[in-house]
Image (cartoon, grey):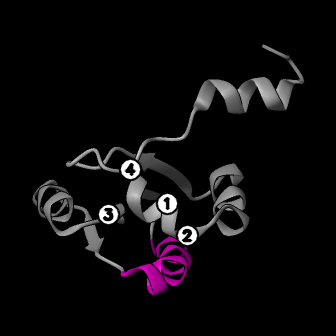
Amino acid sequence: MVAPVYLGDEVGAAGYRLAGARVRTPGAAEAAQALAWAREQAPLVLVSAAVAAQIGEAQLRPALSALAPLVLIVPDPQGEAPLPDLAARLRGQLGIEA
């Protein structure tokens, strides 16, 4: 079985590494490349909210929409970057106005 990959900061990476995940701590310029690498390496890719904000929507949206590998955005340990608003995204996709 292939281990999941976590992309995020050093503190989060230490915890995910203890749980058995492979980790990378990309800088802002390397975030999109790290996501592409992780999608080739693992069936599950966990991306911190801060790294997701650095990637950009044009590259992040197809990764989140793909059936494989599963790409999830997880909260930052420090909580500095907010998670995407899932309810607003779903309302937009369904065409429901709030």
- Residue 65: x %, y % from top left: 70, 50
Disc 1 to disc 4, C-alpha distance: 9 Å
Dot 3 falls on a residue whose secondary structure is loop
Upstream in sequence: badge 4 or badge 3: 3
Magenta-colored span:
27-41
* Closer mark to the observer between disc 4 and disc 3: 4
Tag shown at residue 81: 4
Q: At label 2, which amino acid type do we have?
A: Ile
Task: Report the number of discs.
Answer: 4
Upstream in sequence: badge 2 or badge 4: 2
The reply to whether discs 2 and 4 touch (Cβ–Cβ < 8 Å) is: no
Dot 4 falls on a residue whose secondary structure is loop
Q: At label 1, which amino acid type do we have?
A: Ala
Dot 2 falls on a residue whose secondary structure is helix
Residue at 55%, 70% (x, y): give it.
55
In this picture, residue 42 sits left or right of residue 65:
left
Give the labeled residue for mark 1: 52
Q: Residues within 10 Å of mark 2 (few under 14, many from 20)?
A: some
Give the labeled residue for mark 2: 55
Q: Quadrant of the C terminus?
A: top right
Residue at 63%, 23% (x, y): give it.
87
